[in-house]
Image (cartoon, grey):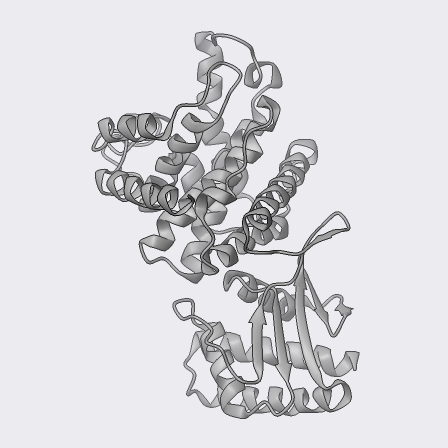
Amino acid sequence: MTDNARSFVTVLASALSNCSLYSAEHEAVEELAGKALSILKELIAETGSLEIMVVESDLVVNKTPLRDMGIHGAGLVRRLKRKGLSRVDFLKDITFPELKQFITEAADADRQIRPLPHVKTGVIDVRLSGITVDVDIDTDGLFRIASLQSERAKKVYQGMSSHGRLHVAGIEEIVATFIDAFRRKANILKLISPVASFRDHTHVHGVNVAVFSMFQAETLGARDELLYDIGVAALLHDVGKLFIPKEIRDKEGILEDREWEEIQRHTIYGARYLARAEGLARIAPLVALEHHLRYDGQGYPRLVAKERKQHLFTQIVAVADFYDAMRSRKKYRDGSGTAEILAMMDQGAGTEFNPFLVNHFSKIIAQAMHSSF
């Protein structure tokens, strides 16, 4: 079964790539889809169905991990994650039109994968350090999702601070999990984690900013790869703080001028670090650089030309960054209430923040609060 499973993954990934490059009607796509169906029929004849799961960065077919799948395996994993999927089941009696439709919709960043009689898509259990937890849509399940993703982010951040390595697969898993929760109509406020301690602030804040940023983007119409890229960039926007000396980053009390100047450099440190990372959303370094630049260009870093406007993605992240920073409890102040924060954001509309995004964010937060009761 393993050889046939490897062949199927290779041919399916090639069909998806060709469909993205050309069109669903291209002869190469037709040929590859037909070949994939032939292999799939053989596999289903042996086992009754074919189950493909994504666990971290690995493919698991009918409970058997497929190692060393190279570019084809990595490409399939990436496409499924960007669709918010971690499981696909191909069932007995699948037809060529069904497989062709799946390939067409999985290859198109702007299309949803519609339900099919013999192709089932969804998510598997969230797995972290050997712990398996069912992902439910009730309140307890949502808090559990938030907690698990916060723990996963902590491990990713610890890896960066200890040996400088960015675990891209871990970042993708966090973002894909939240995208799936949005699609299942989860309440945004149930996916936000509290900051338990100041030492936890960077990774928990990163997760919360990613949730708030993706929530804004989704309600503005962003889908699939666009939503995924915004989530990744938001999750990593403050990563430069890991490269600030600990005695400055965790200092009690008021920072001296030179210390504050060093803190401001976290935007440059983060952008440089992310620019070197392979396989990362290309917008991530830019968001890390710009998220304190302000809508009117008056923030920092000053190396950016004053007439330059923040990228729209950065403007979305900046709104989420401010809101979560103000609502969080830090060592030097209590968190502010929602009405107070939204009022401060409204005062900064047009200078600190994009006024349209401030207005939109206020509306969707009010709706989320109303529906949470």
Up-down relation of residue 67 to residue 31 (above or below): above
The one nearer the camera, 261 or 138, is 138
Q: Nearer the viewer, residue 333 or 202?
A: 333
User: Quadrant location of residue 159?
Assistant: top right
Residue 156 position, x and y percent, is: 64, 41
Question: Residue 19 location in percent, x, y?
Answer: 46, 78
- Which residue shows up at 47% across the image and 7% down it? 256
**319 or 59, nearer to the observer:** 319
Q: Residue at point 67% right, 59% down? A: 125
Residue 218 visible to the viewer: yes
Question: What is the x, y in percent for residue 104?
Answer: 46, 79
Quarter of the image with the C terminus is top left
Judge from the rendering whether residue 260 lies leftward or rightward of residue 2; answer left or right.
left
Work out which quarter of the rendered image holds the N terminus and state it. bottom right
93 is higher (above) or lower (below) than 275: below
Q: Residue furthest front?
A: 373
Q: Is residue 135 above or below residue 167?
A: below
Q: Residue at x 77, y 81 (%)?
A: 3
How many numbered callouts?
0
- Quarter of the image where one finds residue 78: bottom right
In the image: residue 170, left or right of residue 290: right
**Residue at 60% in and 27% down:** 196
The quarter of the picture where residue 317 lies is top left
Figure check: 334 above or below 107: above
| Image location (x, y in percent) of residue 44 | 70, 87
Asked if residue 311 shows in the view, the reply is: no
